[in-house]
Image: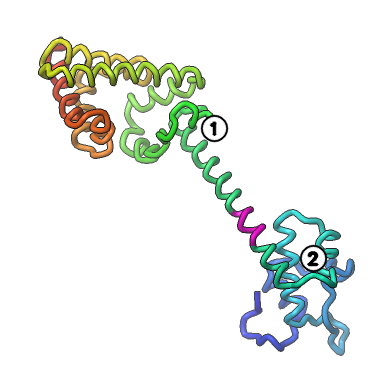
Amino acid sequence: MEPSGQSLEADYTVGDLARASGVTVRTLHHYDQIGLLVPSGRTPAGYRSYAYPDLLRLQRVLGYRALGMSLDDIAVLLDDPAADPVDQLRHQHALLGARLIELQRQLAAIEKTMEAHQMGIQLTPEEMFEVFGDLDPTEHAAEAADRWGDTDAYRQSQRRTSCYTKADWQQMKAENAVVLATLVQAYRSGAPATSDAAMDAAEAHRQSITKWFYDCSPAIHRGLAQMYIADPRFTAHYEEQAEGLAQFVHDCVTANADRSP
C-alpha cells in the first residue's frame, strides 16, 4: 500500500494515502476525527501528514473492516497496549483466509446455480447433490449450449426440464438407472446387438430420452450412438459399467434404428 515513488521515511499527504489505500479522503478525515487513524503530523500549512506507521495502521483497519468489524471495535483492538501488532496481523490473515474460502464456496454455488438454470435445472446446489451425487450435471453446460443451442431438440429439452421439480429429477434418475441396467444385462448375456433383447433395450433408452428431454427420433438416436463411441467422456460413462458396453450400446442403438419404420 506504499504510494509509488515514495520511500518509507517520507511523509504522505491525505491524497497520497487515499490513492494508495483506495479509500476516500473524506473517509480518512472521518477516521482522524474519531481517533481511529490520527496523522502523525501536520505540515506548516496545517495539512495532515501521514508517516509509514500510519499506513500500516490503516492496512489493519481496512482488513478488519473487510471482516465486518465496527470502527469502535477496531479502535479497541488496535489500541490495546498489550496487543502484539504482528500477532494481530497473523490473526487478521487467518480470518481473511477463512473468509476468502467461504466467499469462494459461495461463488462456486452461485456459478453452479447459474449454469443449472441455463440448462433448465431449477435446483439449488444442495438439491443437485441430493439428486445427482458426485455427478455434476452442469459440468459441460456451456459446451452443450455452444454445440446444440440452436437446435429444436435443445430448446425442447430446456422447456421441459425448466418445469421439473426435485421429485421429477429423482424419478428420471431412477428410470434411467433401470434403462442402463437393462442395457448392461443384455450385454452381459452375450446376446448380439442385433437381438430383440438388445434392440428392445436400445428402444427403451430412446423412449426415455423422448419422455424426459426431447423427441428422440431413430435418426437422432443413431447420431447419439455415434457420439457414445466418438467422445471419450460419453464412452467412459458406459465403460464404467462394463468394458465394451459403449460399443455395444452404439451397435444395438444402430440396429434398432435400422429396424424402425
Query: Which of the two residues, 68 or 44, is positioned nearer the viewer here?
Result: 68
Specify the quadrant that holds the C terminus: top left
Going 62% across and 85% down the picture, which residue do you hit? Answer: 5
Q: Is residue 239 left or right of residue 70?
A: left
> Is 173 rendered above or below residue 118?
above
Task: Please give the label number shown on residue 126.
Answer: 1
Q: Which residues are magenta?
A: 94-100
Q: Amino acid at mark 1?
A: Glu
Task: Please give the label number shown on residue 173.
Answer: none
Specify the quadrant that holds the N terminus: bottom right
- Secondary structure, mark 2, is helix
Q: Amino acid at mark 2?
A: Thr
> Is 156 rendered above or below residue 226?
above
x, y percent for residue 105: 56, 46
> Which tag, 1 or 2, sits closer to the chain's start?
2
Magenta stretch: dominant SS? helix
Q: Residue 8 sits in which quadrant? A: bottom right
- Secondary structure, mark 1, is helix
Query: Which of the two residues, 150 or 144, is positioned nearer the viewer here?
Result: 144
**How crowded is the residue under tag 2: few (<14 C-alpha within 10 Å), some, or many (20+)?**
few
x, y percent for residue 42: 85, 84
x, y percent for residue 71: 82, 60
Going 35% across and 36% down the picture, which residue do you hit? Answer: 144
- Asked if disc 1 and disc 2 are in contact, CB closer than 8 Å, the reply is no
Q: Residue 145 sits in which quadrant? A: top left
Give the residue at mark 2.
Answer: 27
> In 3D space, how far apart are the residues under numbered discs 1 and 2 (Cα atoms)?
41 Å
Q: Is residue 92 magenta?
A: no
